[in-house]
Amino acid sequence: MASKTVDGYTWEPATGVVKGLKTDAVVKPAQSLGSKDNIYDAVVIGAGYAGLAAARDLALAGTFWSSSYSGRSVLLLEARDRIGGRTYTVNKDGFLYEMGGTWVTHHMGYLFREMQRYGMDRDLVTTGSPDMHKGYYTMDVPGAKPRTLSHEEAGAMQAKAWDVFVNVDGQYGRTLCPLPHAQLDNIMVDRETVEKWDQFSCQDRFDQIQDQLTTEEQGLLVSLLLHISGGDMQTSSLWDMIRSHALLMHSSDNFTDVWLRYKLRAGQTELAKRMFHDAKARGIDYSFSSPVQSISQGAEKDGEITVATHGEGAFRARRVISTIPLNVLKDIAFSPPLSKKRQEAIDIGHVNHMTKIHADVRNPELERWNGMRFPGLLLYGYGDGRLPNGNVHLVAFGADEREHFVPEKNPELAVESFNKLHPMDIQRLIFHNWSTDVYAKGGPAWWRPGYMSKYQDELQSRHGNIFFASADWAHGWRAAIDGALEQGSLAAQSVDGELGPSRPSAAVESKL
Ligand SMILES: Cc1cc2nc3c(=O)[nH]c(=O)nc-3n(C[C@H](O)[C@H](O)[C@H](O)COP(=O)(O)OP(=O)(O)OC[C@H]3O[C@@H](n4cnc5c(N)ncnc54)[C@H](O)[C@@H]3O)c2cc1C
């Protein structure tokens, strides 16, 4: 039975904006703690996918090889009342709404492994409707008459514009980013070349190629880039687009299949729950609604770490894995202080302040509609299924509009923006504002020009006995669920590797 998290908002004409959404992600009771004197092998901070992977892997460490070991002792600390972080599923009136991370694919190795492990790899649904070809696409860009197209026509225009944009080397990025999980220090490309390309913004590249595109293609491309990066054209790095194209196997034919087609039928929260329950069954301690305030480690090399929380006091551990997002890290006090370089990277942060809003509407024709309008507070809208009450579900995305648009304060602007995409009769809006959320302060990380060259290695490195794991600086699927899982798994592996033999299980102890 879903409970209410304090996160997220609903708007209906009759009620206005109401805070809090129903989700199975809420953990009750919020605490399961052992003695305060415990010195944990590891404290994992954050119960998003990175934290869940790290906690679960450490709890299971060594147990596959020998039943005489019971894994690492782990405490999972989370500021929110729920698991999932920037990925969670709202369950409202029998319909599932993904508030953050949504789409899955077998091209995401870490994610697919989890889906298989928990029996969710084939239980998928597709976005849109099976007979989407019967629907239509609306386009409204400056300098061209707004018009209606077929999905095929719009898809071909988008593919052409995207291909021109990412074809920086005449080989669609193959020579620059042949292995997207190794962007820097790739065996096939020297680092200097990558660093040179990393200096460009999306605007720089757009200025180079815009005369190869029609007015409509230009508008379509800019709104596509902005709703991917969640920033603006000057601050969004071109490299992250090249990397994204490399992850599509350097072909825009894979754009929809890899990025936008498949969803988990049972919702993202179900996968996160299975990971959490797995870790719980292995005996981890946890405390939700427990924001971490400071992390201090002793002077000696193997010094113990103290993690102080707001509300639940302090906890001690031999190692810490922090999965706190990039834009939030500046709120945590570290002792000894972080390196100057890491602190600089944290102070700059990432640029993604995208908007994602779900709408339930009374217009049956919109079930098979997609559309875009540029400029606008909402740039893209997608028809995505029918609700049990017959209404149509839409989801829309916008870029960084924080200065003019805070949906929980101006829901009427959200309604207006949906109607600018296409006239519609909105019955309900459901959304999470990731930028005003103090535990995210932004969407999935999109980096600035030059940021990767300067800061990636530092962000991925450890600080004494503190390890940092986040989708925000993952190797391959940075800014995606897979990147979070990658980072959590790698950090757990490093921690387990250096802690020495794991604990004998209780059963073995009693025999001895
Ligand atoms: C709107 C949106 C759409 C997206 N779409 C997709 C998609 O379709 N496919 C895809 O693969 N990815 C998508 N992503 C990206 C993906 O959701 C994220 O990259 C991923 O979930 C991040 O996981 P994480 O564990 O690194 O960070 P998070 O999920 O942010 O987890 C970090 C956790 O740390 C907690 N925390 C923060 N501060 C503290 C503190 N002081 N003390 C204790 N805990 C703290 C947070 O509450 C959070 O639970 C999307 C993201 C958004 C926002």
Image: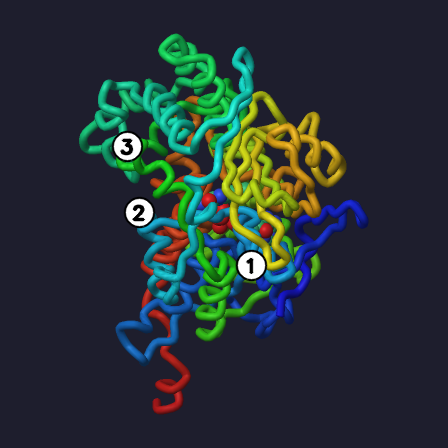
- Residue 383: give x, y in percent of width and height: 53, 42
Which of labels 2 and 1 is toward the front? 2
Q: What is the spatial separation of the Cα atoms under label 3 and label 1, in whole angstroms?
A: 35 Å
Asked if residue 296 can be seen in this view, the reply is no
Number of numbered tags placed on the structure image: 3
Q: In front: mark 2 or mark 3?
A: 3
Q: Nearer the viewer, residue 265 or 368?
A: 368
Write down the residue under mark 1.
83
The one nearer the camera, 300 or 139, is: 139
What residue lies at 37% left-to-right and 66% top-to-bottom? 119
Q: CA distance from mark 2 to mark 3?
A: 13 Å
Please give the label number shown on residue 251: 3
Residues at discs 2 and 3 in contact (Cβ within 8 Å): no
Color theme of the render: rainbow
Q: Nearer the viewer, mark 3 or mark 1?
A: 3
Residue at x-position 65% and y-position 37%: 424
